[in-house]
Image (tube, rainbow, N blue to C red):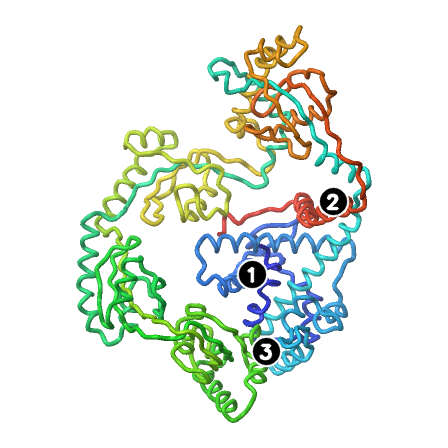
């Protein structure tokens, strides 16, 4: 989803980054005057939108900002998620550039007065209202935003929160600008009564007909002759379908597997057996995991079945005494040993509230001191809720008095979980996590069941350096033997299986057969057809040698570039002529569909209650030309041969069943209009983008 949609849904979390942020008129003014533009002239051009440069550094800054938002809900970003973030960041910046230029053409602006009203006017923007809602009344609370105003006014000029807030305002106002433009265009959309009537009949008028069909599959490919003219005719008729929105490249490759050998696996098992005795005797299980485990996941108390182990091992550990060590055992490609650190009976869920102090700004020691001061104030009778509203970095809970609600084990990070589930109702606790220093109050605990804390040491089974060297040498030998023309020959000689990555775009993070492929994709987009890879590319346990075989440039692709793609359709065209001639011969002298079937050697198939809006022939596929011809025919009249997707058809309409007259054209128009409006945003942007001459250089940078 787009970043603005993400902001709307995650407003509380986003504002949690911006402790004490508020709108100052001068900040809003600066954003409005500058337009928050990321588009400046720079030699590091990631791309262009209608002649306007998208600067690489501005893009990376925006990716970092968007990634931080995703990390709040997703945790660490996988290469695939990072690629997704980069993609929608690009789309966001392209959209902003396009909308900004279109708005300038039409003198559409979000002025200082309007922007000020959006944040703290009588009817603030919905995002602001959701962020500063009073939890007791469920309504927007102007006092909440006023407290943020005070905090921002007291901050230093170089406080990073000011820039974070300004970035948020930029997106808020940009969204408003886009909304105005879309509304301006959308207001011109209209559905008339004739369109409503046509749509109603397309969905409700029924056709009953019989048909015979001779399938293209009935004619072997070796029984037809396809000419260059056949290809050119099909290409010319469908040229609009071959418009390539971005450059694509195809490369062949071979992969040498550097998976661990049996000897490598045995060596890893021996290493973890040595660690088993040390795990048994260590007095600091957490430190031991940090030192020796590959997956350094903090371990917390968990219920049976939730220890992160396979069911058998989970059951063994959950029912064993404290200090019990199990293993080595093989799981998910790793040898593991596990130790029962502790087990106890504890609550199933906890209700708590907290105040989060940002240690990144004032340092850990000062954050702890501040939390301790707040704790003493609360113990002295001060309102926890009032202090949370003023001091908590977690704005989404601060506006609720710090309330986090009721949650089960594993909902929070490990130190937070341990504090609230191992404490007792009424406790005030100070805990440090990766988010900062928390002052927590336990309000209630419910349920009671056994939980266990298990430490796991894992060592992945990986190839040794010796194994890797042997495989790398084989790959290097193949690479050294290559010329521009002998890739297939050398691959076959080496007894390897050639794979093909078809139509790869410049920002692809993976291709079929290669999970992490950025390096090799970057090579492909900096090479010429016929080039082989400049080195052996190492992706995980694969050693890859590649050969660039095709470049499809942006724009309308030439016939040669799509010839393989269109070959099945062209062959069907040639077959269609043979089958049409056969059906036409069967039609000559025939007066019924049964006679046509008998002469052509086909079967008569009846169809009932087919509608124009859903032109699917059961057992086949969508046959637009055939069903369209049916609804344009007269009953009891044999059709001419119709070329469809699956074969050539002849049909006869038995009857049409007309629906009741359209009783409420207004309602039908409204439904069509709403459907049109839902598509309008995307269609408008696609049309503008198509004309904006967008140049995308991401393949050279990412």
Q: Residues within 10 Å of mark 1 (few under 14, many from 20)?
A: many
Residue with the mark numbered 1 = 62
* Inter-mark Cα distance, 3 to 2: 46 Å
Q: What residue is rendered at 69% in x and 63% in y?
A: 173
Q: Which residue position holds label 2?
A: 672
Q: Position of residue 416 (x, y in %)?
A: 42, 75
For label 2, the crowd category at 10 Å Cα-Cα, with few meaning under 14, some 14 to 19 and many 20 or more, is some
- Disc 1 secondary structure class: helix
Q: Nearer the viewer, residue 586 or 241?
A: 586
Q: Earlier in the sequence, mark 2 or mark 1?
A: 1
User: Which tag, 3 or 1, sits closer to the chain's start?
Assistant: 3
**In this view, 683 is above or below 66:** above
Q: How many marks?
A: 3
Identify the image quadrant of the N terminus.
bottom right
Report the Cα–Cα distance between label 2 and label 1: 38 Å
Toward the viewer: 522 or 240?
A: 240
Q: Is residue 229 visible?
A: no
Disc 3 element? loop
Measured as percent of width and height from the top left, residue 236 is found at 63, 25
Residue named by callout 3 = 20
Q: Residue at x 67, y 70 (%)?
A: 129
Residue 229 as seen in the image, left or right of residue 513: right
First in sequence: mark 3 vs mark 2: 3
Give the SS element for disc 2.
Answer: helix
């Amino acid at each position: 989803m787009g970043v603005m949609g993400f902001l709307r849904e995650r407003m509380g979390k986003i504002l949690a980054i911006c402790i004490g942020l508020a709108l100052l008129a001068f900040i809003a003014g600066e954003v409005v005057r500058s337009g928050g533009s990321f588009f400046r002239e720079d030699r590091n051009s990631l791309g262009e939108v209608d002649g306007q440069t998208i600067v690489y550094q501005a893009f990376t800054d925006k990716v970092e900002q968007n990634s931080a938002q995703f990390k709040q809900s997703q945790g660490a970003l996988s290469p695939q998620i990072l690629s997704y973030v980069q993609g929608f960041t690009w789309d966001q910046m392209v959209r902003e550039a396009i909308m900004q230029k279109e708005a300038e053409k039409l003198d559409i602006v979000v002025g200082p007065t309007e922007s000020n009203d959006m944040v703290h006017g009588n009817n603030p923007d919905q995002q602001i209202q959701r962020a500063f809602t009073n939890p007791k009344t469920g309504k927007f609370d102007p006092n909440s935003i006023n407290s943020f105003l005070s905090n921002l006014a007291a901050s230093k000029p170089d406080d990073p929160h000011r820039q974070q807030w300004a970035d948020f305002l930029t997106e808020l106002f940009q969204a408003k600008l886009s909304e105005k433009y879309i509304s301006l265009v959308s207001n011109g959309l209209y559905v008339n009564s004739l369109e409503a009537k046509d749509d109603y009949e397309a969905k409700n008028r029924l056709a009953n007909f019989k048909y015979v069909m001779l399938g293209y599959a009935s004619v072997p490919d070796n029984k037809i002759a396809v000419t260059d003219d056949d290809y050119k005719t099909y290409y010319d008729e469908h040229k609009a379908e071959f418009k390539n929105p971005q450059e694509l490249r195809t490369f062949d490759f071979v992969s040498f597997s550097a998976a661990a050998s049996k000897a490598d696996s045995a060596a890893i098992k021996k290493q973890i057996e040595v660690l088993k005795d040390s795990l048994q005797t260590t007095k600091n299980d957490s430190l031991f995991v940090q030192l020796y485990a590959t997956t350094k996941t903090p371990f917390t108390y968990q219920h049976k079945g939730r220890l992160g182990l396979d069911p058998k091992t989970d059951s063994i550990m959950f029912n064993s005494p404290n200090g019990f060590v199990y293993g080595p055992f093989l799981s998910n490609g790793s040898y593991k040993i596990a130790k029962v650190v502790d087990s106890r009976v504890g609550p199933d869920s906890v209700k708590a509230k907290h105040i989060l102090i940002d240690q990144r700004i004032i340092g850990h020691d000062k954050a702890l001191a501040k939390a301790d001061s707040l704790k003493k104030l609360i113990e002295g009778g001060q309102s926890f809720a009032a202090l949370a509203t003023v001091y908590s970095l977690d704005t989404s809970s601060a506006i609720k008095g710090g309330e986090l609600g009721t949650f089960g084990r594993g909902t929070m990070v490990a130190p937070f979980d341990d504090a609230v589930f191992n404490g007792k109702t009424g406790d005030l606790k100070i805990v440090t996590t990766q988010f900062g220093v928390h002052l927590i109050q336990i309000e209630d605990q419910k349920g009671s069941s056994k939980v266990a804390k298990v430490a796991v040491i894992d060592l992945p089974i990986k190839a040794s350096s010796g194994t890797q060297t042997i495989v790398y040498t084989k790959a290097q030998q193949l690479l050294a033997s290559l010329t521009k023309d002998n890739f297939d020959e050398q691959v076959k000689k080496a007894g390897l299986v050639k794979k093909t990555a078809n139509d790869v775009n410049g920002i692809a993070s993976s291709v079929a057969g290669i999970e992490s492929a950025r390096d090799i994709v970057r090579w492909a987009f900096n090479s010429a057809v016929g080039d082989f890879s400049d080195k052996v590319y190492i992706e995980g346990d694969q050693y890859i040698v590649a050969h660039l075989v095709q470049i499809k440039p942006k724009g309308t692709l030439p016939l040669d570039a799509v010839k393989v793609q269109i070959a099945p359709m062209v062959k069907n065209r040639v077959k269609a002529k043979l089958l049409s001639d056969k059906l036409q011969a069967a039609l000559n002298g025939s007066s019924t569909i049964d006679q046509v079937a008998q002469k052509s050697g086909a079967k008569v198939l009846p169809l009932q209650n087919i509608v124009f809006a859903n032109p699917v022939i059961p057992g086949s596929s969508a046959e637009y030309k055939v069903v369209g011809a049916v609804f344009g025919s007269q009953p009891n009249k044999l059709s001419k041969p119709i070329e469809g997707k699956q074969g050539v058809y002849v049909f006869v309409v038995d009857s049409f069943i007309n629906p009741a007259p359209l009783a409420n054209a207004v309602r039908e128009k409204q439904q069509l209009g709403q459907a049109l409006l839902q598509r309008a945003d995307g269609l408008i942007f696609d049309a503008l983008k198509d004309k904006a001459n967008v140049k995308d250089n991401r393949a050279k940078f990412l």
